[in-house]
Every structure is written in C-alpha cells, then in structure tokens.
Image (tube, grey):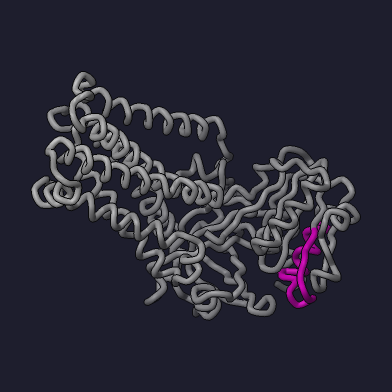
C-alpha cells in the first residue's frame, strides 16, 4: 500500500460498516448446561426402558452396561460434531481453535464407548446363549438388522480418529484428511440407523424414539445451517472476487477482494474467514486466512504467506477469480479486552491480524505494539503498522534479527513493556512463538485469562 493510500485510509473511517456480534458468555454457558442435560436425558432413556428386576439374569447386566455405553457414545458423537459446527454463539466466546482442541480431547471417548458397547453386548448375549463370543459376534453380524451398519460406522470412526493423531495428521495431505473426515457423517447416519433399528430403548417405545430422533435431526440441522447454509448465503450475497494480488515480502502476498456490500460483512479486526478458491482442484476445500484490514469501500484484504499448496495457489490466483467465504470466525478481537491497556505482539505473517486489530481497537485504549521478524524485509505491512501506531499514539517496537540476538523472554518483555502485567496481551504468529510469548507474559505477571491468541494449525 502506498503512503498516499495509507494516509487516505487513516483519515476515512469505514462508513456503514456492520459490527460483528458481541460474544454472549451467558448464552454459551446455557448451551453447555443444555449439553450436560442432554447426556442425563440420554442415560435416562436407556434406564427407563430397562426392567431393572431382570438385571440378575445371566448376562443381562453386561448387556445393560453395553447399552449404556452405546447410548453415551452416540450422544458424545453429537456433541463432538457440534463443537466444530461453527455455532456462532459458542464460537464467538471460545474461539475456533479452542473448540477444535476440545473436539480433539473429546474425540477418543466416543470410540472407547462404542468399542465397549460392542464388546459388552457380544459378551452378554454370548452368556445368555451359552455360546462363545466369536460365534455370537457372527450371529449378530449376520442375523440382526442394523448391526453390520453399526460395525461399518465404527470402522469409519476409527479411520477418522486415527487420521487425527498429530503424527499421522502431519504426514497426510490436507485434502486426504478432509476426505476421510467427510465419511464421519456417513458413520453418524449408519450409527443412528443401527440404534433406532436395534436399540432396546427405542423398540416399542415411540416417545423415546421421537426424542432421540429430534436430538439427531437438530444436530444435523445446525451443521447444515452453519457449515453450508450461512456460508452459501454470504457468498451469494457478497459475491467476492479477486481484484488484485500484490507482493508484501518474501513469499507474502496480499489479495485484494472486491464484492457487493463487503462493508456489511460482520467482521472485527483480528478475525479470519475460511476461503475457497472457485477454481478446479481448489474449490472443494477451505483454508483459514485472517483479514489484514477492515472492509471498506466494497473491498477487503487478506495477507498470506505461501507455505502450503493452497496458499501458494492463492498467491498465483488471477484477478477476476471468484471466491467463496465462510465466517468470519475468531475470538481474537477487541471484545476480549478487559481494560484500556493492551499489548499486541505479532511475528511473520501473524503481524497481519495484529494490524487489523490495531485499526479496530476502541478509542482511548493505551497500546504497545511489538512486531518480530528475522529481517527487515519480513516485517509485513511495516508502513501501515507504523502509520496506525502513530495515529493511535501506540508505542511501536520493531524487533529484527535472529532469536538469540533479539530475545523476547520475560526480562526482555518487561524492558520493552514494564506494565505488561496490568493489561491484555494479544499474540499472533507461529505456534511456538505464541507459546513462548504467552509464557513470558504470564511470567511477567500478566493474568493468563487476559492473554489471547488463536492457533490455525488445526
């Protein structure tokens, strides 16, 4: 961006820009409580349709425990997919990276519970039939409707789970990982059909079946609405198109996007969108890129570093190429502020959301800005950061050089920002960099709850 363009941007605020919805922690907590209540209802459905007096019969207690495990595992699947369904009321409070972390932490439990369900049901029925477990498993697979479908669903879930382990995930192409996870939805459909066909709580219990079906249909509706419907509507309404691509540093480009009423896109500085390039071999998967400036005059900008196939392809995309958008997402915004003192820290291409956040901070906020790079050429959007810092009266610290020569440990951070402990700290950059800065800030006295960062390495 030229000096003239920077000056114009500084003195012309976006008019009519639509603000992003403010986070609503109370509603998010209510939904978390509702999820807990749903688990209780799930277990109650299982218990209420069981004749407790029969639990003393041979194998019956084992079968009952298997049914409980199966119902709990199925409910955990619902929660698992809702965590990454991009529900705005939750995402705006927790942030997508935290939701993905919870998704990963919860991920193994449905597999454990469904595996326990299969083992316990097989052992319990084998005990009742006075036969071996292998023979009983064959009988279940070949004579009970829905059991084969349930087994196939379990196999698909195992595939998705294995592909999500970090060591394996790093070896897979994003497209392969994404395709494997698409089969999760098929697994959920097969699991649901297996349950309503064979589940003791539903056979002859229409009310229980209706409640369970409503839970699954509600989850499916939420996924379709926020993963498909809202992105499709926003893309059709705003019609984003690449206007130009400009070089901003080594392997770093800014893509200027024009569209219809982009100023009305409800986005805050620091947020990101999932972008799809509507071109052959690229349209079917999306990648997250932060905005590097707020929308204005029917245009917005994202700045990316060419480190993967998608980002390299995006850097070479021709003007006029149509895009699809999903979002905006992220809790790395002014709404996380708890006071009027803030430190913004960015490294590499992580400087770009810091630049947008600097533009969007409330008036009167006292700010320090630290930008970190190995060389002057890697200080992305340097002139803009300087201009916005000057306009806001922010203290700008440019740290250039190898990490050993320009450290950002606790003492170095305190030397630059002595009162870091009394404000909020926003950090964006490579994963290891964010972890180190967060640790340094907390060691210097900052409240961990006021250290904000989002990870894109999902």
Q: Is residue 67 visible?
A: yes
Residue at left 70%, top 68%?
A: 348
Above or below, comparing residue 438 to residue 78 in the picture = below
Residue at horizontal 66 percent and vertical 59 percent from the top: 353
Do we see residue 222 in this rendering? no
Nearer to the camera, 285 or 240: 285
Question: In the drawing, does residue 226 fall left or right of residue 1?
Answer: left
Residue at the location (18% across, 37% down)? 127
377 to the left or right of 126: right
Horizontal side, residue 235 vs residue 392: left or right = left
Q: Give how far across and how far down residue 217 sits, in percent.
A: 28, 40
> What are the residue bounds of the magenta stretch?
370-391
Query: Magenta span has 180?
Result: no
Q: Position of residue 76 (x, y in %)?
A: 38, 41
**Residue 126 percent coordinates (x, y):** 17, 41
- Choose between 170 and 458: the one closer to the eye: 170
Q: Is 325 placed above or below 92 here?
A: below
Quarter of the image that includes the N terminus: bottom right
């Amino acid at each position: 961006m030229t000096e003239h363009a920077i000056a114009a941007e500084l003195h012309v605020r976006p008019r009519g820009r639509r603000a992003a919805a403010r986070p609503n922690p109370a509603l998010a907590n209510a939904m978390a409580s509702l999820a807990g209540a749903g688990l209780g209802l799930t277990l109650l459905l299982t218990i209420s349709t069981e004749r407790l007096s029969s639990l003393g019969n041979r194998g019956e207690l084992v079968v009952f425990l298997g049914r409980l495990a199966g119902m709990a595992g199925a409910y955990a699947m619902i929660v698992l997919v809702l965590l990454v369904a991009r529900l705005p009321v939750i995402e705006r409070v927790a942030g997508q990276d935290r939701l993905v972390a919870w998704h990963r932490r919860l991920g193994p439990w449905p597999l454990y519970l469904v595996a326990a369900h299969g083992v316990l049901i097989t052992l319990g029925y084998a005990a009742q039939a006075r036969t071996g477990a292998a023979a009983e498993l064959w009988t279940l697979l070949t004579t009970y409707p829905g059991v084969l479908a349930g087994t196939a669903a379990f196999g698909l879930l195992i595939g998705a789970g294995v592909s999500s382990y970090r060591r394996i995930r790093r070896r897979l192409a994003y497209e392969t990982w994404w395709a494997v996870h698409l089969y999760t939805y098929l697994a959920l459909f097969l699991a649901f059909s297996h349950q309503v066909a064979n589940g003791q709580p539903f056979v002859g219990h229409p009310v229980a079946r209706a409640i369970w079906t409503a839970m699954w249909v509600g989850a499916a509706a939420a996924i379709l609405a926020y993963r498909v419907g809202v992105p499709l509507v926003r893309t059709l309404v705003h019609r984003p198109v690449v206007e130009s691509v400009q070089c901003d540093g080594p392997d770093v480009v800014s893509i200027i996007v024009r569209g219809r009423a982009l100023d009305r896109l409800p986005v805050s500085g620091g947020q990101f969108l999932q972008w799809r390039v509507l071109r052959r071999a690229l349209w079917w998967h999306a990648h997250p890129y932060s905005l590097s400036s707020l929308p204005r005059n029917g245009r917005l900008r994202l700045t990316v570093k060419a480190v993967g196939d998608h980002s390299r392809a995006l850097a070479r995309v021709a003007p006029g190429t149509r895009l699809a958008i999903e979002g905006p997402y992220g809790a790395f915004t002014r709404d996380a502020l708890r006071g009027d003192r803030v430190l913004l820290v960015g490294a590499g291409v992580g400087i770009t959301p810091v630049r947008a956040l600097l533009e969007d901070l409330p008036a009167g906020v006292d700010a320090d800005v630290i930008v970190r790079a190995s060389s002057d050429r890697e200080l992305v959007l340097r002139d803009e950061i300087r201009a916005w810092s000057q306009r806001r009266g922010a203290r700008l610290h440019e740290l250039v050089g190898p990490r050993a020569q320009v450290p950002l440990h606790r003492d170095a951070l305190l030397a630059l920002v002595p009162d870091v402990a009394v404000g909020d700290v926003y950090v964006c950059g490579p994963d290891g960099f964010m972890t180190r800065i967060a640790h340094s800030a907390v060691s210097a006295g900052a409240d961990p709850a006021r250290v904000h960062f989002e990870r894109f390495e999902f």
